[in-house]
């Protein structure tokens, strides 16, 4: 099973069945399961396992596939013990950053026979993988095996005798023969959620504005933690593996560290981040604070981040952008639509309407948010509508969650102090509005569509919430 929270019992990736009931294995002592039947996904009845895998593939309920083995077992346990129970509440124990939950619920209904869906026609998985690569920003496999966690993650093929290296306090790496030994050497401690309030770190530039916006620090929250391994003189495993974390792991230090330490030690070295490591060291969306007018002019302050000024200028040339040095975690313009999303949402707020969004090099999307989220997207030939729809639903959830709920706290020195999965504020399945996606047919060359959906839904969500001046709009006390 997979490690996404290290161990906090909060991501659900390591879920197993104990006497048929779902349990999070990372926080379940071995003595509590002595003499009981423990079932992993690999131990599930092969026909049942295949049914879940095919359903997840048919609905687009698995993108990177890191979280889905645990989710499948949770849903299997629910189906065994509480037939007919709604699965959305059961998913509160899980984090899925890719799919936006809806396709997972659809897969559950397929397996339990509640959907009445017709048999799926054959699919071209090569075309599906091409669409997934366009949407995810890196090569990605598509097929039933991905839902079973077999997409080929960075740590899956590490040699059993590899040294383990983990980030050490103050920089550098601590080594050990096992992850536990390396973490003891590093003095690692369990991540916690703070009692501090998440705050927007920048002030709106002075001016007479039709609309203003300030954003807090937020955590990308990718589930597959940074990992790599390398043999001496070899090429390191790619931390992006079967999912690019939507730009958040583009510049991960794991691969270069694996290569250097392998050469220095003369042994295979395996780099492993814990959840607190990834949260402290991983890049965040650059916070912004800005004001804009209905004519498209305005001023936007943004945490100093290489490339972010250019990203904003490409979509909002009427905004004057000022970079500001601010104490806080690292930031990256590689993160999905960083800067561009905030700028376009601010302009939509100033105009009182969110028009169609087209990002440079991408497709066009429009969105409305009310009782449900409705999305229309045009991005060339779909290649595979299941994959495209899945990415658009996932982007809609991510945007809705970012605007309404997501924020992490930092201390006076700018150090992140919210280090648990549940402190990130990701909207769970039970509170996610239904998403309806319309794909506009086109014979044009295929291009990314879900990033434009991400921006369009963020702007529409903010308008629906009355353009409250600070994100997230539903702030935690």
Image (tube, rainbow, N blue to C red):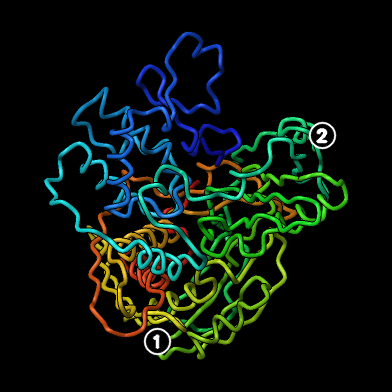
Q: Is residue 319 visible?
A: yes
Give the number of the disc on residue 294.
1
Q: Is residue 352 visible?
A: no
Q: Position of residue 427 (x, y in %)?
A: 40, 49
Residue 310, located in which quarter of the rendered image?
Answer: bottom right
Q: How many marks do you count on the picture?
A: 2
Residues marked 1 and 2 touching at CB (< 8 Å)? no
| 190 in relation to 120, above or below | above
> Is 36 positioned to the left or the right of 79 in the image?
right
**Picture residue at 61% right of the left edge, 60% below the top:** 249
Density class for disc 1 (Cα within 10 Å; few <14, some 14-19, many ≥20) is some
Q: Which residue is mark 2?
A: 185
Judge from the rendering whether residue 41 lies leftward or rightward of residue 79; answer left or right. Answer: right
Q: Residue at x 53, y 21 (%)?
A: 28
Crowd class of label 2 (few under 14; some 14 to 19; many from 20; radius 10 Å) = some
Residue located farthest toward the right when viewing the structure as drawn: 264
Image position of 244 with respect to 292: above or below: above
Secondary element under disc 1, as helix, strand or loop, is: loop
Q: Residue at x 52, y 66 (%)?
A: 138
- The answer to which quarter of the image holds residue 284 is bottom right
Q: Earlier in the sequence, mark 1 or mark 2?
A: 2
Q: Residues under labels 1 and 2: Cα distance? A: 56 Å
Q: Secondary structure at mark 2?
A: helix
Asked whether, in this view, residue 249 is left or right of residue 41, the answer is: right
Q: In the image, 312: left or right of 86?
A: right
Residue 17, above or below 277: above
Q: Position of residue 316 (x, y in %)?
A: 49, 86
Residue 230 placement (x, y as % from top left):
73, 51
């Amino acid at each position: 099973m997979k490690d996404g929270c290290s161990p906090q019992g909060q991501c659900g990736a390591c879920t197993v069945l104990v006497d048929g009931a779902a349990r999070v294995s990372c926080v379940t002592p071995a003595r509590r399961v002595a003499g009981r039947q423990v079932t992993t996904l690999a131990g599930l009845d092969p026909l049942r396992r295949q049914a879940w895998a095919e359903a997840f593939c048919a609905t687009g309920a698995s993108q990177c596939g890191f979280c889905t083995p645990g989710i499948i077992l949770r849903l299997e346990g629910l189906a065994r013990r509480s037939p007919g129970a709604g699965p959305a509440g059961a998913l509160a124990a899980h984090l899925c950053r890719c799919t936006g939950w809806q396709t997972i619920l659809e897969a559950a209904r397929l397996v339990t026979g509640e959907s009445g869906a017709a048999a799926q026609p054959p699919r071209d998985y090569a075309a599906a993988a091409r669409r997934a690569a366009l949407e995810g920003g890196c090569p990605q496999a598509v097929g039933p095996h991905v839902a079973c966690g077999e997409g080929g993650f960075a740590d899956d093929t590490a040699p059993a005798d590899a040294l383990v290296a983990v980030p050490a306090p103050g920089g550098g790496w601590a080594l050990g023969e096992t992850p536990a030994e390396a973490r003891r050497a590093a003095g690692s401690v369990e991540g916690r959620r703070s009692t501090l309030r998440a705050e927007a770190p920048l002030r709106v530039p002075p001016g007479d504005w039709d609309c203003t916006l300030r954003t807090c620090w937020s955590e990308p929250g990718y589930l597959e933690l940074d990992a790599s391994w390398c043999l001496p003189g070899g090429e390191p495993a790619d931390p992006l593996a079967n999912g690019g974390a939507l730009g958040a792991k583009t510049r991960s230090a794991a691969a270069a560290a694996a290569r250097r330490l392998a050469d220095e030690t003369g042994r295979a070295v395996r780099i492993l981040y814990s959840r607190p490591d990834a949260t402290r060291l991983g890049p965040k969306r650059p916070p912004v604070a800005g004001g804009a007018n209905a004519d498209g002019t305005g001023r936007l302050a943004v945490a100093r981040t290489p490339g972010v000024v250019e990203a904003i200028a490409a979509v909002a040339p009427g905004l004057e952008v000022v970079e500001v040095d601010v104490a806080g975690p690292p930031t990256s313009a590689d993160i999905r639509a960083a800067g561009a999303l905030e700028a376009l949402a601010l302009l939509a707020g100033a105009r009182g309407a969110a028009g169609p969004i087209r990002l440079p090099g991408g497709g066009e999307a429009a969105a409305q948010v009310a009782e449900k989220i409705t999305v229309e997207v045009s991005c060339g030939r779909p290649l595979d509508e299941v994959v495209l729809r899945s990415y658009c639903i996932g982007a809609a959830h991510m945007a809705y969650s970012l605007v309404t709920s997501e924020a992490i706290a930092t201390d006076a020195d700018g150090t992140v102090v919210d280090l648990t999965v549940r402190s990130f504020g990701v909207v769970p399945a039970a509170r996610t509005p239904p998403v309806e996606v319309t794909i506009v047919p086109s014979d044009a060359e295929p291009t990314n569509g879900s990033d434009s959906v991400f921006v369009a839904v963020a702007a529409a969500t903010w308008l629906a919430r009355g353009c409250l001046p600070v994100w997230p709009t539903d702030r935690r006390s």
